[in-house]
Image (tube, rainbow, N blue to C red):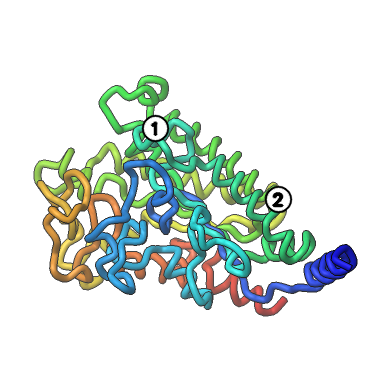
Amino acid sequence: MATLLFALVSIAAALLASTTRVEARAFFVFGDSLVDVGNNNYLATTARADAPPYGIDYPGRRATGRFSNGYNIPDLISQGIGQSESPLPYLSPAMGGSRLLNGANFASAGVGILNDTGVQFVNIIRIGQQLQYFQQYQSRVSQIVGPEETQRLVNQALVLITLGGNDFVNNYYLVPFSARSRQYSLQNYVPFIISEYRKVLSRLHDLGARKVIVTGTGPLGCVPAELAQRSRNGECSPELQRAAGLFNPQLTDMLLSLNSEIGSNVFIAANTQLTHYDFISNPQAFGFVTSKVACCGQGPYNGVGLCTPLSNLCPNRDVYAFWDPFHPSERANRIIVQQILTGSLDYMNPMNLSTILAMDSQT
């Protein structure tokens, strides 16, 4: 009797898997601290944001592992595409069952395009491992809805990937005469990491991603951490600005080349350097009182060390472009996401997210 019951349950489960359709658009996130929603909370690493005052403006005033005072970029994109909640960090114990169908966030603070980026943080999810987790994720979802529906879910999903900044800040320029800066001039380092990034994105496409927003770096030389370290009178660091100025156009060219090779506009270049620079060059036009001083930190420009309970903390986060020495405030993130949603070709090439959603609604 027990054997018969088990067989009937197995047949029912198989039929359910073969007929279940996932209607909501899934959302997958890969990358670094700009888009991590808490994976590093589950790792033995110093690259964490799981203590106050992080999350001071997040619902419940909780430090969740987001490097923000509140919502970060994936949260706001999730809201923009109508998801009920932002995809959970993949390492979260709550990541299972029907919540898998919402997508997953694989990002990990400290990582870069290169495996040797972020070695000082020891235990982080490097991009190759993030892609392996994506494979594992698909196997887990297959057990719920079957392989065909899993493939459809992944093919129709929106993907966000944010990499590159750490390859400069936490690798090439981490220390004077770093191993990578001795190996490559900046002019040669940028094409090298672009070529490595192309391999990552090709692999992402092989794994089923068909609509991928790829953000460039911000103006690396203008963040409070670099002003504190390299600036005498508040001017952006020319060397890091040169790095961003080389990286971002080459990234866009590489994405357009990949699209041409694939024969479809799979990869969308988000010019986050330009978006950031808009409010860094004219903060008052966006309602900020400063784009140089971080809300949370210490030392010049509040740009030294980490944001901790002992740091200086501004009373109104909405008037600061930067939350901590490296990361935008929630309000700045809202400006960035608005450009991702509706920005012109200067900001989103070859199309913005609203156009993607409109095209999908017609198919």
Residue 22 location, x and y as percent?
69, 72
Task: Tell me: 172 left or right of 223.
Answer: right
Q: What is the count of numbered marks? A: 2
Mark 2 = which residue? 262
Mark 2 packing: few (<14 Cα in 10 Å), some, or many (20+)?
few
- Residue drawn 44% across the image and 28% down it: 188
Single out the mark in the foreground, 2 or 1: 1
- Residue drawn 66% across the image and 78% down it: 361
User: Is residue 277 in view from this perspective?
Assistant: no
Task: Tell me: 145 left or right of 252.
Answer: right
Identify the secondary structure beneath mark 1. Answer: helix
- Residue drawn 33% across the image and 24% down it: 178
Instruction: State which quadrant residue 14 falls in.
Output: bottom right
- Residue drawn 59% across the image and 55% down it: 267
Q: Tag 1 or tag 2, which sits nearer the N-term?
A: 1
Could you say which is closer to the camera, residue 36 or residue 176?
Answer: 36
Identify the secondary structure beneath mark 2. Answer: helix
Mark 1 = which residue? 119
339 is higher (above) or lower (below) than 307:
below
Specify the farthest residue to the top.
182
Could you say which is closer to the camera, residue 155 or residue 236?
Answer: 155
The kind of residue tagged 2 is Ile
CA gap between label 2 and label 1 equals 34 Å
Could you say which is closer to the camera, residue 204 or residue 184?
Answer: 204
The kind of residue tagged 1 is Val
Mark 1 packing: few (<14 Cα in 10 Å), some, or many (20+)?
some
Residue 23 location, x and y as percent?
68, 76
Residue 287 location, x and y as percent?
21, 73
In the picture, the disc for residue 142 is none
